[in-house]
Image (cartoon, rainbow, N blue to C red):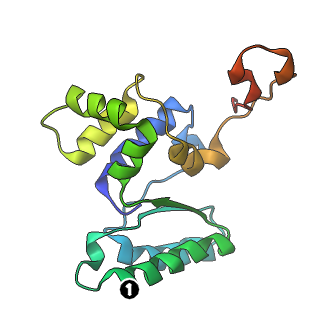
């Protein structure tokens, strides 16, 4: 991860998804900016460690360099998928991705529920709030660790949620 919002929010989402981070050996590492991701990812992948990398597509790390250089850098991060990493793009940033996932109205309600907090602390509070759904991009991040239970015959049920395979252990 490249930022504080993700570092604070992801453990809350893991808890809501019943992902036992310590038991699974999951560490959330904030690397201090997008430019630091490639070197960190190279080390992790060289040891065969499962890796999910999440990055902002529009980072302040590239204000002076320009959009073309940042897009080239982003392409390099996307290439990590060919080396076995799960790659999650936060477009353009975590907060905007969360807003798009929750929808404007719910995101505004959540922000109003937690006024006067830093972006990172507000992200953590929203992640822990049972009134906010867990966004799909968060499920992608924790995908390999989600507990799994298959519904026997989803077509036999009138409940649309039974058409989804849920993971529970």
Rendered residue at 23%/26% (across/down)? 113
152 relative position to 61: left or right = right
Whole-percent x and y of residue 42?
54, 78
Q: Is residue 27 visible?
A: yes
Q: Where is residue 11, by image quadrant?
A: top left
Q: Position of residue 159 (x, y in %)?
A: 71, 15
Compared across the picture, whether 148 is left or right of 106 comes to right
Q: What quarter of the picture does the N terminus occupy?
A: bottom left
Which residue does the numbered mark 1 point to in the structure image? Answer: 69
From the viewer's perspective, tell me whether residue 149 is left or right of residue 4.
Answer: right
Q: Quadrant of residue 104?
A: top left
Task: Check the image and report above or below for 160 versus 84.
Answer: above
SS label for mark 1: helix
Foreground: 62 or 86? 62
How many neighbours does mark 1 have within 10 angstroms: few (below 14), some (14-19), or many (20 or more)?
Answer: few
- Residue 81 quadrant: bottom right
Residue 17 horizontal/vertical position (percent): 55, 33
Toward the left, the furthest residue is: 116
Q: Is residue 83 left or right of residue 157?
A: left
């Amino acid at each position: 991860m490249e930022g504080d919002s993700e570092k604070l929010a992801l453990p809350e989402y893991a808890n809501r998804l019943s992902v036992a981070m310590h038991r699974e050996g999951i560490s959330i590492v904030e690397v201090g900016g997008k430019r630091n991701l490639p070197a960190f990812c190279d080390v992790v992948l060289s040891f065969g460690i499962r890796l999910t990398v999440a990055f902002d597509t529009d980072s302040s790390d590239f204000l002076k360099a320009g959009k073309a250089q940042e897009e080239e850098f982003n392409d390099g991060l996307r290439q990590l998928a060919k080396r076995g990493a799960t790659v999650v793009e936060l477009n353009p940033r975590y907060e905007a991705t969360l807003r798009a996932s929750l929808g404007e109205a719910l995101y505004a309600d959540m922000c109003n529920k937690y006024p006067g907090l830093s972006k990172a602390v507000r992200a953590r509070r929203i992640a822990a709030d049972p009134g906010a759904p867990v966004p799909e991009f968060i499920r992608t991040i924790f995908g390999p660790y989600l507990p799994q239970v298959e519904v026997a015959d989803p077509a036999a049920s009138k409940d649309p949620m039974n058409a989804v395979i849920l993971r529970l252990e």
